[in-house]
Image: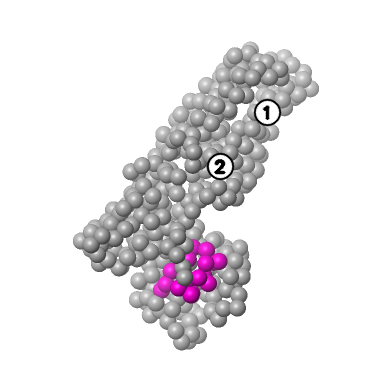
Amino acid sequence: MRYIKDIANITMDKDKCIGCKMCIKVCPHGVFSISEGKAFINYKDKCIECGACSKNCPKEAIKVSAGVG
Amino acid sequence: MTSNYKLTFDELRKNLDRLDVWILVLDTKGINVWCAAGKGTFSTEELIYRIKKHKIDKLVTHKNLILPQLSAPGVSSYKVTKYVGFKINYGPVKARDINKFLNNKMTKDMRKVTFNLKERLLVTPLEFVYSVKYIPFIILFFLFLNILSGSSLIDGLKDSIINIVPYIGAIFIGTILFPMLIPILPFRIFSFNGILLGIIYSVLLFNNRLIIYDKPFLWIIGNSLLLISIIAYLAMNFTGSTTFTSHSGVRRETIITIPILLLLVLSGIILIILNAF
């Protein structure tokens, strides 16, 4: 089941990523994956903008327009 | 850590039976973990406050806090660690998987949220009951029209009650059938799927030319438009009950759908009124 394509308001600054994998751990829908030691947004359309990733990124590399959920 | 929603707390307690652990309950105003996290009551601040207030560092020798997976939208774990010195670990989504988590046997899917048929059906009865409340108003609308066009109170009421049956069906389709069918419906926008189901429903309902619905063309089209609108609206409403819609997506859907619904509803009402006179 998928919702509207290409609408999730989520961006990531790859330069700030230290590869801690917290985003991968806290995402309830598996949006992130890891490649060459850095995380990246792999399945943007699965993102529900819950904000767990951005809240738990120690380098504040992820920005999400999180609603109330 | 957990919320102070009774159902959550009881489920957690039940699954921690015979384990030597402490439970720290946060004041989330009686709301469950995931909603509270999104709302900001299951927060970094509340967590730090409770840990300091109950002097948790004096209570346990270890330095491990386990948080529910779905509290992550509300908690910056690295900030909590910085302020209270405890290490934060996110446990599974479901309390019943905690045992596996503690024994290092947790799988990745236990950090994910699903929305299968059973889970979808669980949230539908409430929406159905909420919507059925509006049936008397629709009966009154039909009754009013009937009386204005000259029928007696008794005949008008009988006719209105017969006319209302498709509307109860529409509410069922919008609140229960639609959620069941989501995986096989063609559109991503919920209201569009609602319109599709509404069209199919109306065609099936009125094409059979049931004797009791042997009504003029205007009546059929007018009521179809209303039935389609109701199903589309209820379908759009379901975006708030799912685990896979985003705020941005729902905003887009709402902006597109509301004008369409207004058009359909107004047209339907106008046709029904025209038919009555």
Question: Quadrant of the image for the C terminus of chain B?
Answer: top right
The one of B253 and B50 positioned closer to us in this rendering: B253
Q: Do labels 1 and 2 share a chain?
A: yes
Image side of residue B210 versus residue B102, left or right: right
Vertical relation: B150 (above or below) B22: above
Mark sitting on residue B92: none
**Badge 2: residue crowd in 10 Å (few <14, some 14–19, many ≥20):** some
Query: What secondary structure is found at the residue carrying circle 2?
Result: helix
The front one of B159 and A34 is: A34
Q: Which of B11 and B227 is in front in this view?
A: B11
Answer few, some or many: residues within 10 Å of disc 1's Cα (few below 14, many 20 plus, some between 14 and 19): some
Q: Which quarter of the picture shows residue B38?
A: bottom left
Magenta-tinted stretch: B88-104
Q: Where is residue B107 in the image (x, y as percent from the top left)?
A: 45, 65
Q: Is residue A64 above or below residue B54?
A: above
Q: Which chain carries label 1?
A: B
User: Viewer-proximal residue, B132 or A32?
Assistant: A32
Percent coordinates x, y for residue B95 in the rendering: 54, 66
Above-or-below relation of B2 to B194: below
Q: Residue B164 carries which label?
A: 1
- Circle 2 is placed at which residue position? B180
Residue lying at the far right of the rendered structure: B154
Residue found 42% across the figure and 81% down from its top: B63
Q: Where's residue B71, x and y in %?
A: 46, 64
- Chain of residue at mark 2: B
User: Which is more foreground, mark 1 or mark 2?
Assistant: 2
Amino acid beneath label 2 = Met
Q: What residue type is labelled 1?
A: Ile
**Does residue B226 appear in the picture of this structure?**
no
